[in-house]
Image: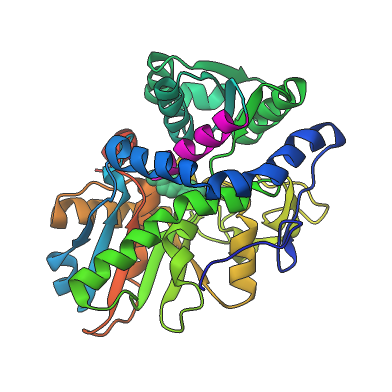
Amino acid sequence: MNHIKPDKYGYYGEFGGAFVPEMLYPNVKELQEHYEQIIQSDSFQKEFKSLLSDYVGRPTPLFFSKNLSAQFGAQIYLKREDLNHTGAHKINNAIGQVLLAKRLNKKRIIAETGAGQHGVATATVCALMNMDCTIFMGEIDIERQKPNVERMRILGAKVVAATSGSKTLKDATNEAIREWINNPVDTHYIIGSVVGPHPYPDLVAQFQSVISEEIKVQLKEKTGDEHPDYIIACMGGGSNAIGAFYHFIDNGKTKLIAVEAGGEGVNSGKTAATIALGKKGIIHGSKTYLIQTDDGQIIEPHSISAGLDYPGIGPIHAYLHDSGKAEVVNVTDQEALDAGFHLSKIDGIIPALESAHALAYLHKMTLKPSDVVVINLSGRGDKDMLTYQKFM
Ligand SMILES: *Cc1c(COP(=O)(O)O)cnc(C)c1O
């Protein structure tokens, strides 16, 4: 079995756990006690799979890129998460969590969002499932990400501005948590990545694991072997990466590579390369690596892609890294941009700037012709048009 599961307290080795304020304890405890039984049930799996296929458009294609393969001298495949409804992998998790909330008799969904991608996915599924939806977003992000704010409003969600602190993602998270504490009975809080207190990392990893489940079947069809030599994915909190890795961990063949956002360079002070710089600590309810000062204050991260602009990583990835089961590398803003433009020209696919980080790492690898490489294309670049235009 290649799955990765936490122990009953939510630990992956020394990472994870559930460090929550006492007032949140009942909410988290309710989830811990019920999530596994609910999501393993036949009726849940049936509804989840049917929505993934008919609403999201899964399975997403595994595209053999002749052009990249010729250029890099290897067999290069792109897993097309960019073709999902709403344009990224985030909807896999949003659907799973809304279905879970329904089975816990919740009437209302709250979520935080930075760039707005998780907010849009959540608002979309709430519209479909007739759930009341409130999205917390930093005041500055509301200004920076107008099109996504409009999308959420059209979908019927209420967007609430977080006006404290740096008025960005971490402040939106604080507001969402406050709201959850005040409404523990009827409200479910949807976290958008493999972060947060147990059981969120395991929950989100299970919902995203459909990505590697599909890759196995698709590769077997195309190459005769379900195990590639490499899987490469970008890493913010790490949900698309763990989704792409899940069924290949410890298989004795596949090298798993997570690509962090180096920003303007790991030593520039403007970076989100958590593993490169991070020290152990606690962020958003779990023990992991994070970028912090010597006295434990979180350092504001930077990345050209809003989805990777996070000062921590999920505890699963801290564990995979420390145990040598996965490798964590980083590329800069410029390298990601170049790779995004390159894929647009060479294959006619404009990738999300997050996904462009995974592509950029190809340029740094030494490959041989027989190597089978799968790159998880986590999302499409429509949302990044302004940034791409600025650097044309
Ligand atoms: C949000 C996002 C990411 C980063 O989140 P992970 O949890 O690390 O996957 C990556 N790619 C896209 C397209 C995103 O929207």
Q: Quadrant of the C terminus?
A: top left
The range drawn in magenta is: 87-104
Q: In terms of secondary structure, what is the magenta stretch mainly? A: helix
Q: Position of residue 36 (x, y in %)?
A: 62, 49
Q: Residue 154's quadrant in the figure?
A: top left
Name the colour scheme: rainbow
Whether residue 1 appears in magenta in the rendering, the answer is no
Q: Residue 103's quadrant in the figure?
A: top right
On screen, residue 16 versus residue 237, left or right, reads: right
Q: Position of residue 353 (x, y in %)?
A: 36, 47
For the point 72% across and 51% down, the residue is 286
Residue 15 versus residue 10: which sits nearer the camera?
A: 10
Q: Position of residue 101 (x, y in %)?
A: 58, 31
The residue at the far front in this view is 42
On screen, residue 62 versus residue 87, left or right, reads: left
For the point 23% across and 46% down, the residue is 350
Residue 18 visible in rendering? yes
The residue at the far right in this view is 22
Placement of 265 over or under 31, stated as above or below: below
Q: Position of residue 164 (x, y in %)?
A: 70, 23
Placement of 387 over or under 357, stated as above or below: above
For the point 76% across and 49% down, the residue is 18
Residue 211 versus residue 386: which sits nearer the camera?
A: 211
Placement of 355 over or under 114, stated as above or below: below
Residue 137 visible in rendering? no
On screen, residue 191 versus residue 216, left or right, reads: right
For the point 51% across and 59% down, the residue is 265
Q: How many marks?
A: 0
Residue 337 versus residue 191: which sits nearer the camera?
A: 191
Whether residue 88 appears in magenta in the rendering, the answer is yes
